[in-house]
Amino acid sequence: MIERSYGATKGQAGGGGRKSRPLNQRPLSTSGLDYYQPLAILQDFHSCRAKWRIITGSNRSGKTLAGAIELSRAVLGRDPEHKYRREHGVAIVIGLDTSHIGMLWRKLSIPGAFKLIPDGDGYRSVRPAYPGAPDVHPDDLARIEEWIDAPPLIPETRIAKVSWYERTRKIPSRVELDNGWCIMFMTSRGVVKQGEHYDLVWIDEQINNDQFFYEADRGLVDVDPQWKALGIWTASPQKQNPLLWELCQKAATSTDIAVYRLHVADNCYVDKQSLEGFSERLTEDERAVRIDGEFAVDRWRIYPTFDITGKHGVDPFNVPEDWTIYIGLDPGTTNCATVIAAVPPEEKNVYIVGEVLVRNSDAYVWASELASNPLVHRSEAWIIDTMAGRQKGIGYSLTVAKQYFEAAEAIGIRPRVVGPLAGFIAGCAVPEVRIETVRRYLAATDDPNALHYGLKLFRGRTTMLAHQMRIAQFDEKNIKKRIRGEFDLLDAMEYLLAYNPRPVVTVKDIVESSDKVYQAFLRKRIERSRTRLDFCGVSLG
């Protein structure tokens, strides 16, 4: 679609200075969309209708350009797949900060998102040597002096109004187009905007606050049966935000998430010599993320061997009466987390059979929630976070442990073994010891030669705990600490497992066992007596 003549400049080899070229030498469209030719994997990305499409990979691999093309097609009513409404839609672009927003707007609104070369009476995009090739076609490379910047993806003629965060720095907050489409720009360091419906969400790179994703996801709930609301996320996974990593893991079993992985080596428009020099200057860890596109999360995960879908998960069943029950508690007003474990008498495994997460409550609400589980009424011991248990809340004379234990007793529940910390057993206060203990449990699971107990979680009943175990990672700035986040259930389990729960023989079991031994003794005595009688005879002299 030729809209009007457009004056452009052509770049010099290596991206150096520019020199002008005569205007109107060849007709040139006002929109770069008319010349865009996607790589094969990106063609699949543009045609996919998954609720969330994610592009991950190394720096300079073409992720942001693909996102900018998708957004431009949508808001200009020019999507060839007809995924979006043509008029009066709402899009939102989420970046890390205002500088990032400014970069994205430049990608959309100024020339140069990619390169064109003269072809006949017009122009076309510079081509790879062959579809999917990592190098530019040699004929086009020989004519590099003729390359020019592609026109803006969103032409100025289509923009009706712009509101700015910072006008002088060209950082927009809202862009309205002549077809009624609106693009809103937000930074993930601001306040989460609530209540909007979005036809398209584009998140670029990592975000500072995961709530922006969750609110955007809510805004994508379909409200018009004629059109689907869709989200895209383009990012190099070089930050320790586990949300993107977890979404990519879910893509294996979800039709709502599609993941596309790009590598800079496959981008024919990147200078390979410059890329090699950049790679050599990086550390091994940085190279794995920035060049190979690996997730930074993978290098820092605390429990990378945990597999809830495999050996560490089990479908729920009724816990037998002779199994020993333990409870791990991480108390708190905002989040009060409890895990329930069961240990069989004849199997070297600890089963996490339940979780209780009470938010914004007190000890009595926790006790009520706990009492609703029948297993708690026959629990052996309760293990608590030592530091939290010894604290006293504002206006309280009792320690936290005392408050929780008294609340439980008031409702009629208590463990068989009462510990020294107001009835609780003090949990291990050394994080390194707790982590190493859990790792031993994970390693021993289903290993017939292991001397240590293994660990299994009830699938479906420990969902939040499994989630916290998957995403828990060390802070790369302080490798002795875990990254910030909600890990209360994981803490509760770590306290419990560091106590090394084992099956306990009760007095009832001893009596029953003794009776069985005595009955067996009587049976053997009778059998021996009968054997001697069988050989009894009379001798005549």
Image (cartoon, helix red, strand yellow):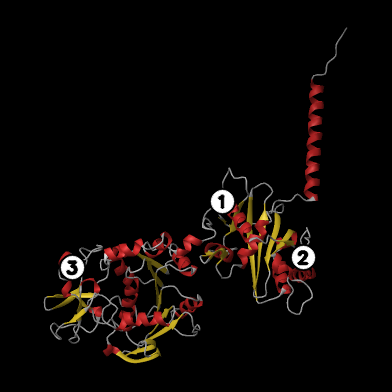
What residue type is disc 2 on? Ile
Crowd tier of the residue under label 3, counting other residues whose Cα lies within 10 Å: few below 14, some 14–19, many 20 or above = some
What residue type is disc 3 on? Leu
26 displayed left or right of 417? left
- Circle 3: element type: helix
Mark whose residue sits in front, 3 or 1 = 3
- Contact between marks 2 and 3 (CB within 8 A): the answer is no
153 displayed left or right of 137? right
- Reply above or below: 430 against 408: above
- The residue pinned by badge 3 equals 141
Quick check: can you spot residue 224? no
- The residue pinned by badge 1 equals 443
Sequence-first tag of 2 and 3: 3
Mark whose residue sits in front, 2 or 3 = 3
- The residue pinned by badge 2 equals 413
Name the residue located 63 percent from the left edge and 55 percent from the top edge: 351
- Reply above or below: 430 against 204: above
Q: CA distance from mark 2 to mark 3?
A: 78 Å
Taking depth in this image into account, of 18 and 36 the one nearest to the observer is 18
Q: CA distance from mark 3 to mark 1?
A: 54 Å
- At which x and y percent is residue 40? 28, 66
- Reply above or below: 503 against 284: above
Residue projecting furthest to the top: 541
55 displayed left or right of 122? right
Name the residue located 37 percent from the left edge and 90 percent from the top edge: 167
- Contact between marks 3 and 1 (CB within 8 A): the answer is no
What residue type is disc 1 on? Ala
- Contact between marks 1 and 2 (CB within 8 A): the answer is no
Which image quadrant is residue 105 in? bottom left
Q: Quadrant of the N terminus?
A: bottom left
- At which x and y percent is residue 398? 78, 73
